[in-house]
Amino acid sequence: MLYIMRHGRTDWNDKGKLQGRTDVPLNADGRAMAEQAAKACAETHFDVCFCSPLRRAKETAEILLRGRDVPLLTDDRLTEMGFGVYEGMENGTMPPDCPVRTLFRDPENYRPDGGAESLSALYERTGEFLRQAVFPLLEQGKDVLLVGHGAMNASIVCQVRGVPVGQFWSAGLEQCKLLRLL
């Protein structure tokens, strides 16, 4: 089986700030969410967990797996999508022509600038991760958990389920909710 989860809340989530690759930690609510997720997933078997190296994802995975004998492996390919100069901006203060607005409203027409990552680059690195790290384990019958971020997780869901880019956000990945992909 393949499972995926988005990290718990952070102060930047609460303020509506775009996090991207900025290494923002979980806040108290985020840690409580991860604790609740750990209880909800207590009976779900995982052979291995891969997560983003960013603190909010890694801490979520550590809380989720506390007391379990499950290897936790970080992989840079699971880092959140980079938003360049737009990281740290609050949703309400983004300029009307900000390309990140397009990403959230019309992903097919997203054109990054200001050092932001493209969807094709995101898909390339997460697709490589799936092919090299995840699919071989699934073929061996292993249960794999991925803990990451909104956009990064969405790219994996789209690739695994064959969802078109226009429906990039359709999985609706809530924070600290386990989603079974395969």
Image: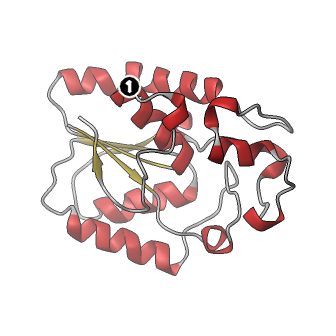
In the rendered structure, the answer to whether residue 179 lies left or right of residue 8 reads left
- Which amino acid does the dot numbered 1 rest on? Gly
At a point 40% along the width and 46% down the height, the residue shown is 171
Does residue 40 sit above or below 113 in this rendering?
A: below
Up-down relation of residue 16 to residue 95 (above or below): below
The quadrant the N terminus occupies is: top left
The reply to whether residue 132 is visible in this rendering is yes
Q: Secondary structure at mark 1?
A: loop
Residue in the picture at 77% in, 53% down = 87
Splitting the image into 4 quarters, where does residue 139 fall?
top left
Q: Residue 93 is drawn in which quadrant?
A: bottom right
Give the left or right position of residue 59, taking residue 116 as reference: left
Place of residue 94 in the rendered image (x, y in percent of width and height, measured from the top left):
82, 58
Q: Quadrant of the C terminus?
A: top left
| Count of numbered labels shown in the rendering | 1
Q: Nearer the viewer, residue 93 or 57?
A: 93
Q: Nearer the viewer, residue 89 or 163?
A: 163
Alpha-carbon neighbours of circle 1 within 10 Å: few (<14), some, or many (≥20)? Answer: few
- Which percent across, then down, holds residue 174? 42, 59
Residue 162 percent location from the top left of the image: 38, 25
- Of residues 66 and 117, the one nearer the viewer is 117
Q: Is residue 83 visible?
A: no
Residue receiving disc 1 = 162
Q: Position of residue 141 (x, y in %)?
A: 14, 28
Task: Say which residue appears at 59% left-offset and 44% top-offset.
Answer: 80
